Image (cartoon, rainbow, N blue to C red):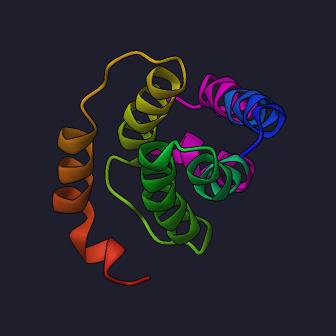
Amino acid sequence: MSEEFLRVAKQEVSDDIAEIGNLLKECFDDSGISQNAVKIEKHIHKLKGLAPMMGQTEIGDIAATVDTLLKLVISGKSIPDVFQTIKKSHQFMHNAINDVKSDYDSLKNDLNKKYSVFLSLK
């Protein structure tokens, strides 16, 4: 990938992560996520595709999991503790794009364990 592509992609990924953070400020619990799920999912879906293209596979992987959960919320399913999950995932993505060490394996294992029933529906 060209340096210009990587620069622009990193800025777009950073902007989407920041926008998710802004949307999360409007949420205080799972019902807040339900009310903002469509808006948040739009940014998560973009991260799912763009982050791996610029070498941020861990961000893309976490985004893919959150994307699945948000699509279930949008369809009317109740996902337990989704607010905290999205907050943790957002913090991980924010840290990762800013080169702050985060424990990807622990987060991924927690998501898989906590939501295995829901993730198997995709």
Q: How far across and how far down the image is residue 17, in percent?
A: 64, 31
The stretch drawn in magenta includes residue 22: yes
Q: Is residue 1 above or below residue 95?
A: below
Q: How far across and how far down the image is residue 30, in percent?
A: 46, 45
Specify the quadrant of the image occupied by residue 6: top right
Which quadrant would the C terminus be assigned to in this image?
bottom left
Judged by its main secondary structure, the magenta piece is helix
Pick the residue in front: 78 or 101. 101
Residue at 46% across, 49% down: 57
Determine whether, in the image, residue 12 is placed left or right of residue 90: right
Specify the segment rendered in magenta. Answer: 15-42
The stretch drawn in magenta includes residue 49: no
Q: How far across and how far down the image is residue 108, in percent?
A: 26, 50
Residue at 37% across, 36% down: 84
Specify the quadrant of the image occupied by residue 74: bottom right
Residue at 74% across, 48% down: 39
Q: Is residue 31 above or below residue 15?
A: below
Number of dots carrying numbers: 0
Q: Is residue 32 above or below residue 94?
A: below
Pick the residue in front: 17 or 11. 11
Outermost bottom residue = 121
Pick the residue in front: 24 or 43. 43
Determine whether, in the image, residue 29 is placed left or right of residue 106: right
